[in-house]
Amino acid sequence: MRALCRVVAMGLLMGGLLLAPNAGMSEERLSSADRMWPQLLNEAHALGLPTKFLKAVPPGFVHFEFDDLHSYAAEYHLGEHRMVLNRALSFNGAGATLRPLGRLTHAEIETLYHELFHAYIDYLVTAAEASPEVALDPVLAFARVQQGCHYGVVLITPVVQRKGETEERFLTERESWEALNETWAVFVGWIVWNQLELTSRGARSIQKSGKSQDEWVSRLRSADREGILRGYYEPEDPGERAVARKRYLAPASRLSEQEAAVLMKNIIEFPPSLLARAKEVLSGLGQGVERYGQCG
């Protein structure tokens, strides 16, 4: 229950994928992003955090901004490739550059990785649109398939606190893409947060067999059983959006075993042994609420 409350709170704080038109970026902002990205990669590597997917994104692609956000801790604007973070995450609160990762809390790093994953998917989409003759990136190709068969029709919880009460929704192309992206970003953030929580106590890396890995697998089993690895989307219909700014997926429409496997292998780079253990957990029957709308 404690983990559920933390994840729900995280969902309420995090910004979603905000659709916006392309906008010109000044040379000053571009150079700032060029400087911040390599620094971010170096600090993430030093902390033992995932960096493979970040290295695929060229410096300058993501434009960082800081603002006094109230509803969310962060926002990512598609099209503009613009990430807006709460000013509290900036160095000395000045809103000029990101605080060193070593001085961020685990929850703040979780939020940051949630948004960084959005940036990665945004880059894959942008690259595919710029060179349609090139074969789709495997992660993006898989995402497009899942968008239709797993997120085209979902169950939502109209009242977040009552996850047992659900309604079926047929999502538009934009809604289904956002629901997939948020679900995947929630999982990436969850992995990073749990890794930091376990290793901060001087325990062995979860990449190696031992107590830390066993506890991580146990946490994954609880998260799946409680149905917390799920995303949300902003309704496209103005009338529904006036009632609820975000619609949260029901536990039955949570992350699937296939999705988790792709993310753990291609994004987080888990060793085969841990990947096998995780897939066993997520494929287990009777763990909790059965999944809805799984792909064949």
Image (cartoon, grey):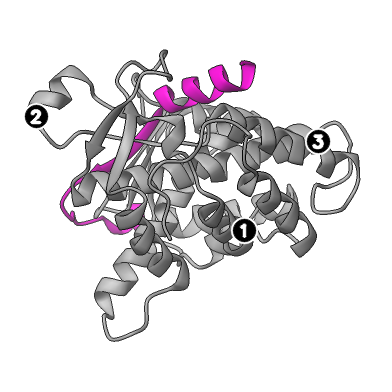
* Magenta-drawn segment: 1-30
Q: In this view, does 282 lie to the left or right of 21?
A: right
Residue 10 sits inside the magenta stretch: yes
- Residue 169 locus on image (x, y percent): 24, 36
Q: How far apart are the two marked residues, 2 and 3, measured between alpha carbons?
A: 44 Å
**Residue placed most toward the observer, 281 or 78:** 281
Residue 238 badge: 2
Q: Which amino acid does label 1 sit on?
A: Thr
Q: Is residue 212 left or right of residue 283?
A: right
Q: In which quarter of the image is the N terminus?
A: top right
> Is label 2 or label 1 in front?
2
Number of labels in the image equals 3
Q: Which of marks 3 and 2 precedes in the sequence?
A: 3
Q: Is disc 2 in contact with disc 1, using a CB cutoff of under 8 Å?
A: no
Q: What residue type is labelled 2?
A: Pro
| Residue named by callout 3 | 215
Residue 51 badge: 1
Q: How far apart are the two marked residues, 1 and 3, measured between alpha carbons?
A: 23 Å
